[in-house]
Amino acid sequence: MAKSVRQDGFMAMDKKSAAITKAKKGWLWSWAEPETRPMVLPKSKTERLALQAKLANIDAERAVSRAYQIELTRTKAVSEAMFKSGKALRYSLISTARQILLRTEAARREFEPGYRQR
């Protein structure tokens, strides 16, 4: 792998080597769906703009639909976490109340004469 110094002072790699900054499709979703890219553009500029607007609207509707689905999934996850958190709080409160009751009963048995014996 041969390196050379360019005029601006940066190192340049030979074309034969694999570059780190290789061009690739790295987007999560492509900006335009393949079916919304016009294969044949009308000759009239008005028709061309109308077709491009129609296809852009289709892309926008799909993007909004994806965002809606993602938001629904996020909302479901948050509501499930809140439900489970509430369930844990309920069990914690029941456990604490039961401990207080049992300790009170034990203390009464210890100090009150004639209170229920075991």
Image (cartoon, rainbow, N blue to C red):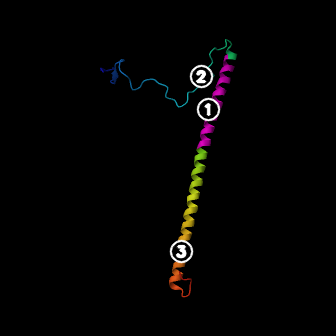
Q: Nearer the viewer, residue 13 or 36?
A: 36
Q: Which of the pair 98/54 is nearer the observer?
A: 98
**Residue 31: mark:** none
Using the numbered discs, state the Cα–Cα distance from disc 2 to disc 1 in whole angstroms: 14 Å
Residue topped by disc 2 = 34
Amino acid type, mark 1: Ala
Q: CA distance from mark 3 to mark 2?
A: 69 Å
Where residue 118 sits: x, y (%)? 53, 80
> Total of numbered circles in the picture?
3
Instruction: Write down the residue under mark 3.
Output: 102
Segment tinted magenta in the rendering: 48-73
The residue type indicated by label 2 comes to Pro
Q: Is residue 63 above or below residue 16?
A: below
Residue of label 1: 63
Residue 40 lies, in percent from the top left, at 64, 14
Q: Nearer the viewer, mark 2 or mark 1?
A: 2
